Amino acid sequence: MRNCFADLGWQQHTGSPQLTGSLQLIATLPAETVDRLDSLLPQLASKHLRAMPLGYLHLPLQRLGDFDSDLTQADYTALGTALNQAYADRQAFSLAFSQPQLVDVGVAVTAEATPEWHNLIAATRRALTQTRKTPLPEAAGSPRIMLLHAIGEIDEAAAAAALQASPALGPVTVAEVALVSMSARPELGTFDYHILANFKLG
């Protein structure tokens, strides 16, 4: 496991070549899922495993690119219109998430990519290609919610043993997507997400 904020680990995790202003589309988590994680995360956190703030827990869908100050209000309006249209015929769905497990830069829960997940990714990318002049970065792979980020040396064997007692997160409803600006905060060992717009499925 590598430190998420050292040796460009944060860049490899987020796909962004800069610390601030990476535009991303994420699926936000329902309140009941956040409540479950609120009681779980303190049990998993340690000196070098920093828990994500509850308000920032999410499912990555698609990185748009780094923040472009030349984008106009008309550009954002066109993007919002395209995404609203793309999500209008997509219905909320559920994903079954694993117990917490060690991943490349911390601890996460994962789920199998269902047809509904693939359809959401495809609808998102179709909408974005209508409003972009440059190719899109790669889409997210299988569903993954990052819970904690590594910020120092981790005893992986001890961490893995501690995670074995953790329950599976279980079903999570995907019903809302947000356009966010993400900034890495290495001094705090976390990321900031500023919501620019929300989109409901269906």
Image (cartoon, helix red, strand yellow):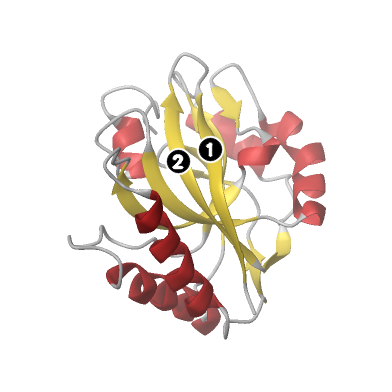
- Residue 164 placement: quadrant: top right
Position of the N terminus, as image quadrant, is top left
Pick the front one: 168 or 62: 62
Q: Which mark is residue 17?
A: none
Q: Secondary structure at mark 2?
A: strand
Residue 88 in the image, given as x and y percentages of width and height: 57, 81
Residue 117 in the image, given as x and y percentages of width and height: 51, 75
Q: Residue at x 25, y 57 (%)?
A: 137
* Residue linked to disc 1: 193
Height in image: 30 above or below 89? above
**Three-letter amino acid code of the residue under disc 2:** Ser
Determine if residue 168 is in view: yes
- Whether tag 1 and tag 2 are in contact, CB under 8 A, the answer is yes
Q: CA distance from mark 1 to mark 2?
A: 6 Å
Near mark 2 (Cα within 10 A), the count class, few <14, some 14-19 or many ≥20, is many
* Residue linked to disc 2: 181
Residue 77 in the image, given as x and y percentages of width and height: 44, 60
Position of the C terminus, as image quadrant, is bottom right
Height in image: 93 above or below 101? below
Pick the front one: 188 or 152: 188
Mark before the other along the chain sequence, 1 or 2: 2
